[in-house]
């Protein structure tokens, strides 16, 4: 089958298309623990080749799945159909203006950052995977990262998209601007269900679970492009994106705080948030890495990184002084620096947190990611952490905790023996306890990583039947034959 499909795609496009065993093995994995071998991998050069392949996939009723860098943690870019590798050829900056940039989806965040930095600009959402992850993947997962606390997620920066739909039709959607007739059908659904949507979405600072229907109409403004955020390539393929860019802040200051326990760090969050930092990140001892851990005995069991941005005037400096004085009732202030190179070095340690967690893998004992991305009101973070640690103790498992504490979005993984049936059962019981707590406290089961294969079955539990039926309608509007990255976001019979 691969051979036939590969040859047919090679005939209708001039892009590189492969279906040899080696390529299929490489594309069968991503940063999740899933493995699914695709039939064919194609690397289109432009939107017209994306269109040709989409038409072909629709005619043959074959699954069509986009792939950026493959750093998604829930199996979002894996499929047994055709993979569109957007990194190889669709990775350019199309235009940079004073307040916006237009890019192809396969450009990595890091490469874009470098170009914007030359002009004194930046796009604040910066996942820890930013050296590799693509703008297409960030849009499709509604990615965030540390600076979401001060600046919002990628949602706040997406101004418009050009898309290709199942069957090859071109689409477009611009903030408070024009949008195509397919997008209009979803806007009609949203506008006739505003109350239902308002009642059933979590009130949190970031959310990548389900389709973000709640973000499309806000304060009488229409943001049609947001239907593609967090949609995991299940509605359309983004072939270019227009994003808002900001001026790089003149002044940055990082306070590094050390706490005796994760609970003590969590208890300090409401106090810290009063000072309006742009990032507040937590690292427990297992995730602290070499610089923050091994070589420096001043560090206790848990570290918080708290960053402030501004123009560096005396008012801001005074605020930071007061903050560091006040926060010393909870912690020791280990570093207090405005040196950019030093700040970047410390952030690199934070970027390695997940790698440090994964080093806990020993044979079949693995840090598992199902509950790794919950989010709730940060005022409830201490209650959540107390609950979580009790659950881990109840099931007698080791664990790691780190992440975006200021947003109430902690990443956590229990270390479970995956070869034992009891291990898998334990993971399911932990998941059930934790999700019940999160949903009972108005949170979301995914703040920024998405649903993918792993959490798709929990989306119904998160939103209930009425909103879920809107998700199915939305999916059917774009893709009635369910060929766009099937098995992610919504499950339904065609
Ligand atoms: C070490 C590590 C740290 C991480 N830290 C963070 C973090 O701090 N914050 C955060 O938010 N996430 C984080 N992530 C998760 C992940 O890196 C992000 O979600 C990232 O944005 C995914 O980008 P990607 O290019 O790798 O996408 P992929 O994994 O390749 O794909 C993700 C999804 O996007 C879809 N997609 C890709 N391109 C397109 C397109 N053009 N059109 C339509 N759909 C498309 C794919 O089909 C898939 O469903 C982390 C992951 C790792 C491994």
Image (spheres, rainbow, N blue to C red):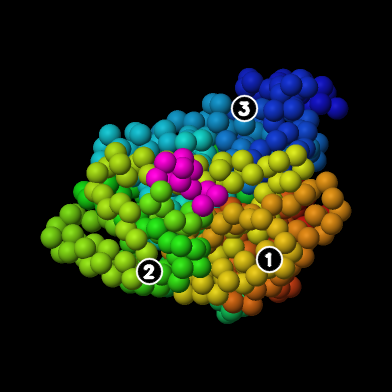
**Which sits in the foreground, 209 or 194?**
209
Q: Distance between the residues labelled 2 and 1?
A: 25 Å
State yes or no: Cβ of the residue under disc 2 lies below 8 Å from any atom of ligand 1. Answer: no
For mark 3, give the secondary structure.
strand
**Residue 303 coordinates in the image, percent (x, y):** 43, 56
**Residue 381 coordinates in the image, percent (x, y):** 51, 70
Question: Looking at the image, which residue sits at the far front?
Answer: 297
Dot label at residue 43: 3
**Which sits in the foreground, 458 or 308?**
308
Q: Quadrant of residue 323?
A: bottom left
Q: What stretch is highlighted in magenta?
A: 285-296
**Residue 363 coordinates in the image, percent (x, y):** 75, 39
Relative vertical location of residue 301 with respect to residue 189 in this rendering, above or below: above
User: Which of the marked residues, 1 or 3, is nearer the chain's N terminus?
Assistant: 3
For mark 2, give the secondary structure.
loop
Label 3: few (<14), some (14–19) or many (≥20) C-alpha neighbours in 10 Å: many
Dot label at residue 330: 2
Label 2: few (<14), some (14–19) or many (≥20) C-alpha neighbours in 10 Å: some
Q: How far apart are marks 3 and 2 (CA)?
A: 52 Å
Q: In this view, does 113 lie to the left or right of 172?
A: left
| Residue marked by disc 1 | 393
The residue shown at (24%, 62%) is 320
| Magenta run includes residue 446 | no
């Amino acid at each position: 089958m691969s051979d036939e499909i590969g040859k047919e795609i090679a005939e209708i496009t001039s892009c590189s298309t492969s279906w040899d065993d080696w390529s299929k093995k490489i594309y069968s994995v991503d940063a999740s623990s899933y493995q699914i071998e695709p039939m064919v991998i194609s690397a289109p050069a432009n939107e017209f080749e994306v269109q040709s392949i989409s038409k072909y996939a629709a005619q043959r009723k074959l699954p069509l799945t986009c792939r950026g860098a493959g750093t998604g943690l829930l199996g979002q870019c894996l499929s047994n159909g055709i993979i569109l590798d957007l990194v190889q050829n669709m990775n350019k900056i199309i235009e940079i203006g004073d307040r916006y940039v237009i890019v192809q989806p396969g450009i990595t965040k890091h490469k874009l950052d470098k170009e914007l930095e030359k002009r004194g600009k930046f796009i604040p959402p910066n996942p820890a995977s930013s050296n590799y992850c693509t703008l297409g993947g960030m849009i499709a997962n509604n990615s965030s990262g540390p600076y979401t606390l001060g600046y919002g997620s990628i949602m706040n920066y997406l101004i418009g998209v050009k898309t290709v739909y199942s069957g090859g039709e071109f689409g477009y959607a611009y903030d408070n601007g024009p949008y195509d007739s397919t997008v209009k059908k979803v806007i009609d659904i949203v506008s006739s269900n505003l109350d239902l949507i308002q009642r059933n979405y979590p009130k949190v600072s970031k959310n990548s679970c389900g389709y973000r229907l709640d973000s499309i109409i806000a304060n009488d403004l229409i943001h049609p492009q947001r239907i593609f955020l967090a949609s995991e390539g299940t509605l359309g393929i983004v072939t270019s994106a227009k994003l808002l860019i900001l001026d790089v802040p003149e002044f940055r200051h990082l306070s590094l705080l050390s706490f005796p326990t994760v609970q003590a760090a969590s208890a300090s969050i409401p106090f810290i948030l009063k000072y309006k930092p742009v990032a507040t990140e937590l690292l427990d001892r297992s995730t602290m890495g070499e610089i923050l851990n091994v070589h420096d005995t001043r560090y206790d069991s848990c570290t918080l990184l708290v960053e402030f941005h501004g123009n560096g005037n005396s008012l801001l400096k005074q605020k930071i002084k007061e903050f560091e004085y006040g926060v010393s009732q909870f912690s020791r202030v280990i570093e207090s620096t405005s040196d950019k190179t030093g700040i970047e070095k410390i952030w690199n340690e934070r970027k390695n947190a997940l790698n440090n967690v994964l080093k806990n893998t020993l044979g079949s004992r693995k840090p598992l990611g199902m509950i790794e991305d919950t989010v709730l009101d940060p005022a409830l973070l201490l209650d959540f952490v107390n609950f979580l640690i009790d659950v881990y103790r109840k099931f007698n498992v080791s664990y790691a905790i780190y992440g975006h504490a200021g947003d109430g979005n902690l990443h956590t993984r229990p270390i479970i023996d995956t070869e034992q049936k009891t291990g898998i059962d334990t993971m399911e019981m932990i998941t059930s306890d934790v999700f019940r707590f999160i949903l009972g406290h108005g949170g979301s089961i995914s703040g920024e990583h998405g649903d993918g294969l792993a959490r798709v079955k929990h989306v119904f539990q998160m939103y209930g039947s009425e909103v879920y039926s809107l998700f199915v309608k939305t999916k059917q509007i774009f893709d009635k034959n369910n060929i766009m990255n099937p098995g992610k976001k919504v499950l339904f019979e065609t």
